[in-house]
Image (tube, grey):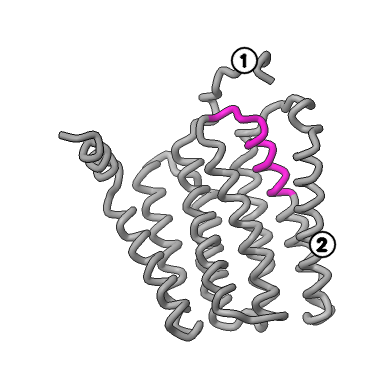
Amino acid sequence: MTDKNINALSILKKANIFDVLFFATFITCIVFSILKERAELIYISPIVVVTILLKYISLTKKNANVLFIITLLSQIIANYLSFYSFQDYFTVISSLTGFYLLLYCIILRKYLHKIDLKKLITLSVIIGCLLVGYVIYSVVSLIISYIPNHNIIYVLICATCLFIYVIIFARIFLNNNYENTGLIFASGIASLFSISLSPINEYFFYSKTFTVLILICHYLSIYLFMKFISETNAEDKKIIDKKYF
């Protein structure tokens, strides 16, 4: 048996029915977003998140984190309302988004450890922080003129929650205490992209291309977050040689 066949068999063993369901609904949703009107996504979109929930429960069983289950339920509701009427339910969607981002932060708190200042105070980190701050500020400034005044507070709260979440997943990535910190970093960047682009797509410039990109990033961010917390034990830190840094 060749190495390729062995690798293929190992992948099939790791996969289960919930992986198949996720990728099937994920691809279906993306195809619908390209070929159909957005109203047709109102039911298929939440189903993708449901498959992630089922996958998570199948992996963790009795050890499932209730907070993560709550975040998934929040996102199911937010997804439904987004395609039902984003502008009419903007307040609810923003509140749910800020809520699940805060829960994300609470879930990731146990993965936070003291960070070496040499890792934190570097040119790349400073540029990254400035870039993230500028992106969030630009999005908020852009959509403020398009939304009612009473919704501005919800935008600011959501933006603050997003910035806090970025700081937390970036710290976990920079600490590099776990084998798969790349998962949480990719998940966080995808969340930043989808959350930032969504209001622009709804209020400023609607495009099917944006919708497709938002959906891809949104689902991947949830799936990768789920993989990180289900496969990473907070107590299983890597032994890192400080001389390396």
Magenta stretch: includes residue 5: no
- What secondary structure is marked by label 1? loop
> Mark 1 belongs to which amino acid?
Asp
Q: Where are the magenta residues, as a range?
A: 164-178
Our reading of the magenta stretch's main secondary structure is helix
Query: Which residue does the image show at 65% across and 43% down from the upper left?
Result: 169
**Label 1 neighbour load within 10 Å: few <14, some 14-19, many 20+:** few
Picture quarter with the N terminus: top left
- What secondary structure is marked by label 2? helix
> Mark 2 belongs to which amino acid?
Tyr
- Is residue 226 depicted above or below 51 in this figure? above
Residue 30 percent coordinates (x, y): 44, 71
Query: Which residue does the image show at 80% across and 37% down from the upper left?
Result: 123
Residue occupied by mark 2: 137
- Is residue 115 depicted above or below 243 in this figure? below
Task: Classify residue 26 as left or right of residue 1.
Answer: right
Query: Which residue does the image show at 54% across and 54% down from the upper left?
Result: 221
Report how far apart the C-alphas of labels 1 and 2 lie in the structure: 38 Å
Magenta stretch: includes residue 171: yes
Task: Classify residue 61 as left or right of residue 92.
Answer: left
Residue 236 percent coordinates (x, y): 51, 24
Closest to the observer: 48 or 181? 181
- The disc placed on residue 241 is 1
Residue 193 percent coordinates (x, y): 64, 60
Q: Is residue 70 visible?
A: no
- The disc placed on residue 91 is none
Q: Is residue 18 visible?
A: yes
